[in-house]
Every structure is written in structure tokens, then in C-alpha cells.
Image (spheres, helix red, strand yellow):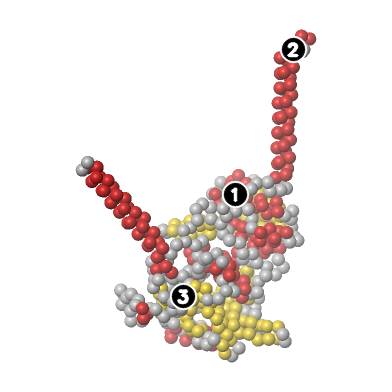
Amino acid sequence: MKKLLNSRTFRQGSAATAITAIAIAMIVVLNMVVTSLSERYILSIDLTENNLFSISEESKSFLRNLDKDVTIYVLSSEEAFLQGNVYSVQANEVLKRYALESPRVHVEYVDLLRNPAFESRFPDLQLNPNTILVTSGGKVRDLTPYQLYNIESYQGQMMIASSQAEQAMTSAMLNVTSDKTVGVAFLTGHNETELPTLQALFELNNYTVTHTNLLTEEIDPESVIAVLAAPKRDLDEDALKKLDDYLSNDERLGRTLVYFSSIEQPEPSDMPNISAFLRDWGIAVENSVVFEASLNKVAAFNMYAPYTEYAEAEYSEATASRNLWVFMPFSKPLSVVFESGNSISTEVLLAFSQTSGVLPEDAEADWQPSESDLTGPTPALVLARQIRYDGTTQLRSNVAAVSSVFAVSSDALSATSTGNGDYFINLFNKLSNREDIVNIQSKAIGGKELGIQSEQALVLALVFVILLPLAVLIYGVVVWLRRRHR
């Protein structure tokens, strides 16, 4: 035994065993340290092009100033939540970043099947798997999985276009920690167009949405914005008085009415009361449809589906800086009745291009515009302001007229290649003097959407579908003929 212990083989083997044991111990300790640090700090690096798995500086700034505790409940086990789709993985990573950025944010996963008593804590909510609850104090905001995504319709099927998980969750935290609420009233009673995506956009951006029937109810005075979406029946005198009283606000002003027009409405002459109301604010809606002659400024080669141009800089700053345009299909033409008068001034915010015009009333089915028909620029969004002063304090109410209700349809607001969603929410925020807002861009996983316009698509099709194959064919024929005659 003594000779074995003193042997060279035993000594070398012992040393190797000791080194191995020390290495294993170091790896275990290092793993424990890294695990502990990862629970407190962000150790991973997001190398994706648009920082898919990070949160924006705007959210970080909000978290740094957060003075209330927020608990986020994910109604699923983490493993089950991650099995949803690739966007669920991205949303889960965003959730973790919130908790790592602020000690006031806590994330908990609750499996409703194993914890059925959890539902009794929120008796007023319909809780389903993968729903996210954002809570603070006694306030709660529930987010369904669909509210984390921008959904687009493609060939009759609904598809996820991009993630808005960060926007949804940061806005929800802002909602439950803020002491201020900003109300929006959707007006009904005259066959208005329903706008569920616009309503969801308001809610996503921390507005409180209500519905007011103008036939039976007064407009909620707590609502700073009222939406009148393409009514198909004229308003009576009583409803018009409600609008006037709302905008006057006992002479304190501070209210905004947003009116959306639609080609599905009756002729303006068949709706004299609404027409007169808008004319009093310096706005007129014509009975026709706007066309755009330049294929470079329309979608899907449709001259009645044009993009607009920005006519001013204040409200369009966020979208213009990203080279995004507002899509305004099937629009009724607007016109400015007066630029100023009776303490009201008007301004065109969006306009169709100089190559736009208005379809003639006697146009045939195969009508095509000539040079004389190009009467643009044609107003697409007109803002009228009524201003008065209380001492040195400016008071203002607004009426904004939009030439097409389809500009706030589901497809238009969720598309990542247009600026509709960003533009309209920025417009509403500025008109309501919002300060407690977050404006976070949606993030698409995978390739970017090719935001080209019809004329560019036509050139690409000509090059790659016709010219390039033709060149290859000609080259092949030439090579074949030369070899054949050798």
C-alpha cells in the first residue's frame, strides 16, 4: 500500500482528480453566480436589427420614474406561454426586461388550472389562459394575447404582422399607476361606422373609451375627444345642440370633435344639418371620390386608394421622420370654406398630391383622368380651431374632419408600411394636450415588409419578370446558335 501511495501513477492520478474536482466546483460556483446575477441584471445582448428582445428608452425612462409597485400576472406557466408562437417568446422577454429594469415591477406566472382560486381575486374580469394582468394598488388592466400583436388580414386570413407587446404593457402600467384619465366618447345613434381597431388604439394608449347615443344621452363632459364616424342619417337639432354644448364646455372649450367621412354616406345635400355644422367650422365635404393619377402614390394600382402628403410639420413629425405616409382610400374630397372667421381658423394637415383630383359626377365606368382633371392638392384632413383667452390663458376647441373612415380601418391602422396608427394617435395626443403618453414602435419578427408603391412595383415586375428572363433567353439562344455552327 505504501509503495502504491508513493507511486508516480497514483500521484499523477490524484493531481488530475483534484484538478477535475476543482474545475467542476468552479463551474458550479460560476453557474450559481451567473444565475444569481441574471436575476438582478441584464447579461444578454440583443443583436437583432430592431432590438426585438429589448425595451425602448421611452419605457426605461418610465420605469426609472415609477413610484408605485406594479405586479404583472401571466395567466399561464412560463413553459406554456412560450409555446404560443415566436411572438410569445418576444413578449416574455420584454416582461423579464421590465422586472430587471425596475425593482418596483414584479412578474408572476399563474397556472389557472393549478390555482383556480386566483380568479376570485378579480371577479369582474373574464380570465383566460395567456391573459396578462397588470395591477397596481386597486387598479387592474387586462391584456389578451391579441392585444400584444398587430393583426392584418391577408387573402381572408388573419395573420400577425408585428408585435406591440411593449407598447401594450408600458401603456397598461401607465394606466394603473396614473391618477389622471383622458376620456374618448364614440358617438352613436345615427348609423355610424363601428371602429373597433381605433377604439383598441385609444385603449392601448391609456384613453378611457365610452359610447354615447346622441339620441338619448349627453356627451360625457369628462371626454376630451368625441368621435363621429361617418353617420348615415342626418343629426337633428337636438343632437347638434349637444355637439355645440360639448365643444363650448361652458365657454371653457378644451374639447375636440373628430368627424370621419365615408363614400357610403348619403350625399351632403341629403344631410343638411351635418353639412351646415361643418361649414360653420370652415369645412365642407363634397359629394364625390378622390382619385390619384400617379401610380407612385397609390396602393395596389388603385387610383382611388391614394397616400396623402403632410401639409404641416407639428402633427406629422413622428411619422414623417420615418418616411411613412398616411393611407387614405376611398375618400370624399374636403374643402376649406374659410381660413379664419368668428374666432375660428382652419388648417389643412393632410392633402392628396398635385396629381390628385375629384371624379366627375358624369364619369363613365371606363373613365380615365386627363391633365385637366388634376386639380390637386386636395385636402384630406382639415383641422378647425376655435380660440379664446381667459386672461393670458389660451382656451381652444377643435373640429377635425377626415376624408375617409377607411383611414382608421383595421388594415390601415395595423399595417407596418404606413403611418396611419402613429399619425392618428399622435394627432389625438396633441389635440388633447396629453403628456402622460408613450409612443413605442411595433416590431416585426422576420423580414421587413417591402413598403413600395405601385409604380415601383411595376418597374420591379418589368425588370425581374420580363426583361431579365428575356435577356437570359436571348443569351441562351445566341450561345446555342454559336455552338451549333462550330
Are the residues tagged 1 and 2 within 8 Å (C-beta)?
no
Task: Find numbered disc 1 in the image and state the secondary structure of the residue it sits on.
Answer: loop
* Camera-side residue of 119 and 196: 196
Between discs 1 and 3, the one toward the N terminus: 1
For label 1, count other residues whose C-alpha is less than 10 Å away and answer few (under 14), some (14-19) or many (20+): few
**Visible residue check, residue 450:** yes
Are the residues tagged 1 and 3 within 8 Å (C-beta)?
no
* Camera-side residue of 72 and 290: 290
Q: Amino acid at mark 3?
A: Phe
The residue that label 2 is drawn on is: 7
- The picture quadrant where one finds residue 252 is bottom right
Between discs 3 and 2, the one toward the N terminus: 2
**Visible residue check, residue 425:** no
Residue at left offset 74%, top offset 19%: 14
Give the image location of residue 440, x and y in percent.
61, 62
In the rendered view, does 69 fall on the left or right side of 340?
Answer: right
Q: Amino acid at mark 1?
A: Leu
Give the image location of residue 195, x and y in percent.
52, 69
For label 2, count other residues whose C-alpha is less than 10 Å away and answer few (under 14), some (14-19) or many (20+): few
In the rendered view, does 305 fall on the left or right side of 362?
Answer: right
Give the image location of residue 258, x and y in percent.
55, 77
* Camera-side residue of 369 and 412: 369
Give the image location of residue 207, x and y in percent.
63, 68
Which label belongs to residue 47? Answer: 1
The Cα–Cα distance between marks 1 and 2, rounded to whole angstroms, is 54 Å
The image shows residue 404, relative to residue 112, as above or below, that is below
User: In this view, which residue lies farthest toward the left?
Assistant: 485
The Cα–Cα distance between marks 3 and 2, rounded to whole angstroms, is 94 Å
Which label belongs to residue 398? Answer: none
Q: Amino acid at mark 2?
A: Ser
